[in-house]
Image (spheres, coloured by chain):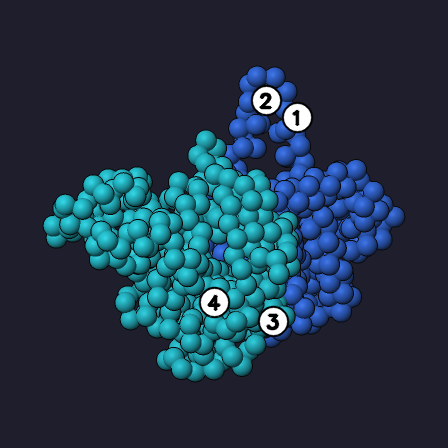
Amino acid sequence: MAPLIEARDLTKKYGQFVALDRANLKVEAGRIVGLIGPNGAGKTSALRAILGLTDYEGQLTVLGREPFRDRTALMNDCCFIADVAVLPSWLRVDQAIDFVAGVHPRFRRDRAAAFLAKTQIGGKRRMRELSKGMKTQVHLALTMAIDAKLLVLDEPTLGLDILARRSFYDALVNDYMDETRTILITTHQVEEVENLLTDIIFIDKGRIVLDASLEDVATRFAAVAVTGDRLDAARAERPFYERQILGKVVLYFDSVDAGRLAPFGEMHTPSVSDLFVAKLSGGVA
Amino acid sequence: MNTNIWLIRREFWENRAIWMIPAIFGTLLILGALFGQISIPRLTTPEQMHEAAAAYQVIVGAMFYVVMSVYATWYLLDCLYADRRDRSILFWKSLPISDAKTVLSKLIVGMVLIPLVYYAVADATALVGAFILSIRARASIGGALWQPDVWWQIQVLWVYCIVTTALWYLPIAGWLMLVSAWAKRAVMLWAVLPPLVAFILERAIVGTQVIGHVLLVRLAGLPYVAFNGANLEWTEGKGIVDIDGVPASVWHLINPSGFFTSADTWIGAAVGAALIVAAIQLRTRRTEV
């Protein structure tokens, strides 16, 4: 089966500034993919291109379509929440539901209503009267009621408090995700999403640094805590990053056989956030 | 209901001023008719009565037309900018609606539906006002304001004005929407400044006034192209008559054959269409303020 999203040499320039520099990535169906990078790494540019909001160079297909040329058709099968604050302030909750139900062939009003019934939000309220957390719930209700194949979330929890964040991600995983759907999330807060992701894509300075499933990560990467005397021997296995914690040095290895590393010390699979820091800190410290 | 209808409804949800401004304006006029001082000279001849009815209707209509022009201008200038300013464009673009449909829905609201709303409210205001004035000034005007043929003529005039206005001002509307889709801030300034600067530069450097002339014709020329004033004159005791001395009707006033065969009309419409296509292109590409 063809990948849901496939980018080859995807490039986006703003004047002199290169936001995406020949980026290659693939997203398969049924995955929850985190597009992770520091601020200004090109995450938003990549999403904008994928969602057909911007022109680009290179090749990009999303659900078999060219996003920029085919945005209208693409939006039948793909929906996105680009930050929570984008529902217009004058819009009433019931108007929002009526409108999306009117224009979206895959919107299921009963599902949106059921989701909203669990909240305290009345249909006659305007967006400007709602808190950020409530707006998120409305936006999520609208989006999750759409039978879309691809859901794209761009920093979805920016500006939300911890309770609202937690309920956002809980709703996403429990009420929305199933094997027919694919979710692509960007965030610069890795800790928040690492438990729900199946795949990670690291992006830095417009380039894809890593594109792997978490199973791959577990087999490919190892972090080994090494004590003083074995350090030189361990370093000979060419770690790509090291850092010091509590008197030990933790070395990070990519694609080195576990049997060779085991003698150096305690070994574990790095967490996504550790791996992120390791990959993006660039070279051996 | 199809997407277009929903897009139109959305404009009415967002811009409640579309009907609130004419409603408030009409209410004020009716309050004026109810409580204001009125002194109307006694009307004696049927011609005088007829003319008073026509003048009354035209004045009410003209007041609404002026308010409508100001509001519609503002609406067109704001409509595409507003979505970018509050970033709701990202929500609208997450729905399967083409940018062309969105832009055209706003154009139709600005050039057809807003005028129709003002037309309906102007009519209602004129009728209620005529009723009030007829009672308050019954000694001097009696039933003068109730002239069905005048009322029908005003309907023709309104429809004609809406059609000709939409066509004649299409390039202005296209320009306003282009600015609305493009400007990062100060849409009003961007709408006015470039033509103004072009006019000044042309006069200062080239010494000609082509741009100034084109702008003047476009902004102020509609009455000359769409209406027929030359063959009408005012005669004591008879009111406005045509060259044969027949009292003028709306059919003398309007000049559809002149308007629809004028090159200016269609050149303007073509320019307007090009500007709207450009606004759609910008809407497709620009999502930031």
The disc label shown at residue B210, or none:
1
Residues at badges 2 and 1 in contact (C-beta under 8 Å)? Answer: yes
The residue depicted at 49 percent of the width and 64 percent of the height is A31
Relative to residue B252, is residue B274 drawn left or right? left
The residue tagged 2 is B202
Which three-letter amino acid code belongs to the residue tagged 3? Arg
Which three-letter amino acid code belongs to the residue tagged 4? Leu
| Other residues around mark 3 within 10 Å, as few (<14) / some (14–19) / many (≥20) | some
Label 1: which secondary element: helix
Q: Out of B80 and B232, give the one closest to the viewer.
A: B80
Protein chain holding label 2: B
The residue depicted at 65 percent of the width and 65 percent of the height is B3
Can residue B61 be spotted in the picture? no
Farthest right residue in view? B244
Protein chain holding label 3: A
The disc label shown at residue A106, or none:
3
Q: Position of residue B219 (x, y in %)?
A: 63, 40
Labels 1 and 4 in the same subunit: no
Residues at badges 4 and 3 in contact (C-beta under 8 Å)? Answer: no
Q: Colour of chain A?
A: cyan
Q: Nearer the viewer, mark 4 or mark 2?
A: 4
Q: Out of A236 and A276, give the one closest to the viewer.
A: A236
